[in-house]
Image (cartoon, grey):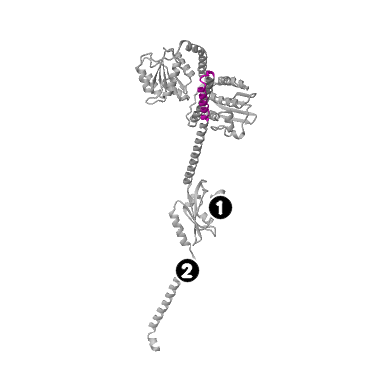
């Protein structure tokens, strides 16, 4: 046996080597299998990191972070984070507290409150402002956090939602504005309903009483006078509403003509001297001796402001009180005269809280104020807006029981010598011709026996105007239902047939201004000379200017007042040197 082993030693050695190699191979495979089993238990980061970066790729415009909440460290961060915050990626990985630099104190507080209330199981979704520390710009961001139970890590997303956030805010503001506007409209309609119904109730009541006393002329006349006063008050309400509407829509136009501030104050003195005297109020106007009183602006609108202020003072000042109107020269610079018009009274005064809203439309201190003193609360709003359009402002100071002072600060261009000379000439001509023109109108011109052409589409208005004209002495009033019919009637008439044409503005087929232009362009002997007067509900300066531009001689605003209609017709006939036939 030994000899056999010795003879086959090489074979045995080979077999032994094979056995050893097999053992080593088996052991190595066992170690590798064990290592493979142990590998997931030693580290979960590669799997988590792969999942996080897949989320980064899916949201390339969002800043993504993987956070270890126990260590309070950032394990991974996307490149968009630096674009959003200005913090380099390596810095946030080494110091997670740098994220606080992007948050304001309020944003940090809001986030902390959100995290404290978070259940750590569902997704956290909040919004806050994030500042870029490099560009110092702030963006509105959505902050979302997803917890991963297996790895105990959080995935945080910061997404810029500034545009969406701003759009939502804008929509909310527009909705609030629309709601406020709707409430304002309803309040406006309610106020207007009350203000219009009050005089209308009086008008209807006095007319009913007049009808019951037709057998008593004096009593009937008294009721008719009361109704007339109420209609004038109603008209003032309508005019104020139209003024407010024009101002708020940016359609009020201011004239720029030379006028004298001294003359304006003189007219204000005359306007209120009798009424204040009757009420027992001492009314004084000072400062109407300015060295350079001639300015360029809208005298009518400025007079409206002063009249509103003095009328308001008279309304709230009892007998024995004082009202003072004072004009003070402040300075003259850059060809402008800067001055202040001060209106002071010793009336009831106003509460300080009410002064904050005194220039709001329909603003009155209390409902009892409207009942006791009347008014719509529009006068102050209109005055304030007119002064603002002129480039000035109004200051008010008041104390309950002691009185109120309004100060109007304005700076108007100083008129040049040519403008002043033209203004003086107009004033002199107007003053010298008033009496002679009145005498001429009364003595030489009359509507007696005249034929008048009237264009008016409203039958009731036409009937009333026709009755007025016949009362004035007219023999015939030809009525045209629109501008085209008026043009046809005039074109077919012989020379001298019509003494004057009264033209409504808003009519079907052809409006009044187009009709006036058509008549002026006709080949008719009277086309260029016949007086044409507008009768229109349009009552603004720009409306009257448009009527004259269309070729009309005058513009009478509705409602038509008998005396005004008669005076203007006769004035136009007299100024043209042709009387009614």
- Residues 429 and 100: in front is 429
Q: Where is 415 relative to 49, above or below?
A: above
> Which residue is nearer to you in this view: 238 or 109?
238
Are dots 1 and 2 in contact, CB under 8 Å?
no
Q: Quadrant of the C terminus?
A: top left
Instruction: Classify mark 1: helix, strand or loop.
Output: helix
Foreground disc of the pair 1, 2: 1
Identify the residue at image location x=49%, y=66%. 42
State which tag comes first along the sequence, 1 or 2.
Answer: 2
User: In terms of secondary structure, where does tag 2 sit?
Assistant: helix
Residue 92 got which mark?
none
Within the image, what quadrant is residue 371 found in? top right
Q: Residue furthest top?
A: 443
Examine the structure image and report whether residue 202 is included in the region drawn in magenta. yes
Q: Is residue 298 visible?
A: no
In the picture of the structure, the residue carrying the numbered disc 1 is 113
Which label belongs to residue 38? Answer: 2
Where does the image place residue 125, in percent across and percent down from the top left?
A: 50, 52
- On the image, the x and y values in percent for residue 49 come to 47, 59
Foreground: 282 or 232?
232
| Distance from the alpha carbon under mark 1 to that under mark 2 | 41 Å
Q: Is residue 522 above or below residue 186?
A: above
* First to last magenta residue range: 195-218
Specify whether residue 459 is painted magenta. Answer: no
CA neighbours of label 2 inside 10 A, class few (<14), some (14 to 19), many (20+): few
Q: In this orientation, does residue 405 appear? A: yes
């Amino acid at each position: 046996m030994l000899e056999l082993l010795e003879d086959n030693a090489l074979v045995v050695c080979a077999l032994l080597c094979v056995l050893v190699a097999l053992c080593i191979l088996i052991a190595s495979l066992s170690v590798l299998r064990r290592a493979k089993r142990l590998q997931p238990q030693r580290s979960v980061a590669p799997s988590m990191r792969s999942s996080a970066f897949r989320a980064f790729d899916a949201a390339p415009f969002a800043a993504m972070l993987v956070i270890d909440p126990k260590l309070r460290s950032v394990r991974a961060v996307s490149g968009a984070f630096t674009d959003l915050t200005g913090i380099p990626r390596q810095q946030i990985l080494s110091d997670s507290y740098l994220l606080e630099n992007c948050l304001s104190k309020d944003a940090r507080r809001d986030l902390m409150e959100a995290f404290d209330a978070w259940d750590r199981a569902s997704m956290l979704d909040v919004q806050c402002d994030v500042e870029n520390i490099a560009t110092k710009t702030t963006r509105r961001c959505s902050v979302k956090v997803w917890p991963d139970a297996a790895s105990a890590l959080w995935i945080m997303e910061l997404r810029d939602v500034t545009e969406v956030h701003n759009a939502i805010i804008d929509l909310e503001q527009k909705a609030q504005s629309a709601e406020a506007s709707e409430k304002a409209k309803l309040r406006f309609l309610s106020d207007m309903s009350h203000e219009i119904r009050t005089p209308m109730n009086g008008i209807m009541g006095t007319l009913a009483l007049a009808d019951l006393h037709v057998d008593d002329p004096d009593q009937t006349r008294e009721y008719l006078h009361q109704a007339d006063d109420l209609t004038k008050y109603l008209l003032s309400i309508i005019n104020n509403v139209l003024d407010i509407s024009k101002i708020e829509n940016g359609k009020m136009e201011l004239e720029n003509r030379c006028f004298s501030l001294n003359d304006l104050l003189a007219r204000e003195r005359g306007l209120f001297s009798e009424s204040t005297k009757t009420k027992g109020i001492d009314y004084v106007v000072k400062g109407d001796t300015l060295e350079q009183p001639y300015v360029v602006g809208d005298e009518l609108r400025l007079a409206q402001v002063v009249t509103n202020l003095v009328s308001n003072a008279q309304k709230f000042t009892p007998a024995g009180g004082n009202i003072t109107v004072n004009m003070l020269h402040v300075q003259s610079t850059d060809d402008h005269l800067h001055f202040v018009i001060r209106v002071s009274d010793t009336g009831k005064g106003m509460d300080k809280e009410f002064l904050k809203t005194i220039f709001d439309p329909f603003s009155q201190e209390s409902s009892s104020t409207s009942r006791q003193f009347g008014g719509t609360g529009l006068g102050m709003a209109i005055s304030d807006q007119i002064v603002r359009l002129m480039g000035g402002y109004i200051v008010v100071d008041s104390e309950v029981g002691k009185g109120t002072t309004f100060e109007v600060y304005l700076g108007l261009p100083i008129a040049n010598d040519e403008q002043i000379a033209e203004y003086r000439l107009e004033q002199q001509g107007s003053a010298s011709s008033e009496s002679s023109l009145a005498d001429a109108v009364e003595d030489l011109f009359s509507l007696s026996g005249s034929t008048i052409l009237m264009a008016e589409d409203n039958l009731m208005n036409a009937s009333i105007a026709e009755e007025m004209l016949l009362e004035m002495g007219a023999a015939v009033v030809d009525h045209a239902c629109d501008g085209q019919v008026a043009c046809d009637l005039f074109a077919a008439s012989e020379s001298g047939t019509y003494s004057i044409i009264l033209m409504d503005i808003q009519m079907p087929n052809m409006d009044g201004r187009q009709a006036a232009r058509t008549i002026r362009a006709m080949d008719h002997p009277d086309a260029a000379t016949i007086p044409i007067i507008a009768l229109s509900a349009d009552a603004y300066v720009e409306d009257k200017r448009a009527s004259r531009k269309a070729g009309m001689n005058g513009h009478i605003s509705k409602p038509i007042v008998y005396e005004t209609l008669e005076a203007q017709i006769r004035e136009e006939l007299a100024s043209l040197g042709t009387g009614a036939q």
